[in-house]
Image (cartoon, rainbow, N blue to C red):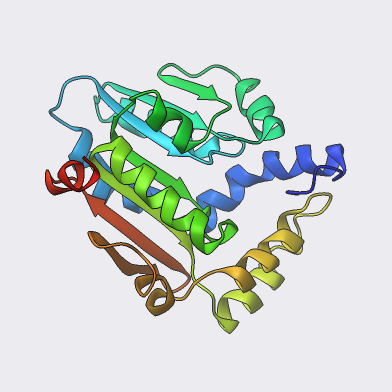
Amino acid sequence: MDRPDCDPERLQRTYEQFALVNRVVSGWRRLYRTRVREQLAGVGPATLLDVGCGGGDLAVMLARWAARDGIQLQVTGIDPDERAFHFAANRKPVPGVEFRQASSGDLLAEGRSYDVVISNHVLHHLTALELQSFLDDSAGLARRLALHNDLSRSAAAYALFSAGALPLTGSYIRGDGLTSIRRSYTVPELAAVVPAGWTVEPHSPFHCLLTYRRHDTYRQRQA
C-alpha cells in the first residue's frame, strides 16, 4: 500500500479496515487508560498528536474516549502521504479532531508542541536514520509524553496474523501486515538503537512500546 501505483480501491478498503484491525490487535484502549489519560486529565484543554495517522481511526477513538472521561482534548492527526490524508480528512467530522498532510519535522519547524505525541505501527516503516530523526522530532514536540506502539517480530505473531487476517479480503491488510511483522523489531533490537531517554518494553506478546517522558535536559541538549 506504500507504493504510489497501488490499486486505489484496495487502498480505500485497507483504510476502512484499519479501524477493526487496530481495535483488535493494537491495544490502544489499554494504553489510553494506563498511559495517556493521566497525562491529559487536569491540565485544562489538552493536545495530542498522532504521527503517521493513516486513515485517522485511532485519532477519532482517542478523542471519543477522552470526551467520555470529561477531558477536553484536541487531537491532530498527521500523515505525509496524500492518500492517507485525503481519506482521513474526508471522514465524518468529529469534534476535537483535525488532520493535516505533514510530517513530524514540519510541525517541529513550525514550533508546535503537544501534551502527548503518539504513533501506531510506524517505526518498522523507517530506516535507521529515519528512526533517529523521528524520535528526536517526537521528543521535541512532546510537552509531557511521547508513546510509540509498534509490532514486535516473532514467528507466533506472523502465524496468528496470517490466519486471523484471512477474512479481510479486498485490501492490503494481510499482505502488508505480514511484511510489517517481518520488518519489525524485537524488544531487545529496538532497545539497542533508540537514543538516550527512551525506554522500550513489551506492550503485549506482539507489540513493543517506546516511551519518552518529558524533562528539561532534552531542550538543553538541543540548544
Residue farthest along the front direction in this orientation: 223
Residue farthest along the bottom direction in this orientation: 155
Q: In the image, is 213 to the left or to the right of 206?
A: left
Q: As displayed, is residue 30 above or below residue 38?
A: below
Quarter of the view holding residue 43: top left
Q: Mark yes or no: residue 144 visible.
A: yes
Q: As displayed, is residue 158 above or below residue 88?
A: below
Q: In the image, is 70 to the left or to the right of 177?
A: left
Foreground residue among 160 and 202: 202
Percent position of residue 93, x then y? 54, 16
Percent position of residue 185, x then y? 49, 72
Residue at point 42%, 29% (across, down):
107
Total numbered circles: 0
Percent position of residue 96, x then y? 40, 19
Q: In the image, is 158 to the left or to the right of 30?
A: right
Residue at point 54%, 50% (across, down):
22
Foreground residue among 137 and 149: 137
Residue at point 40%, 68% (across, down):
204
Q: Quadrant of the C terminus?
A: top left
Quarter of the view holding residue 109: top left
Q: Mark yes or no: residue 27 visible.
A: no
Q: As displayed, is residue 185 above or below residue 133?
A: below
Residue at point 23%, 19% (across, down):
45
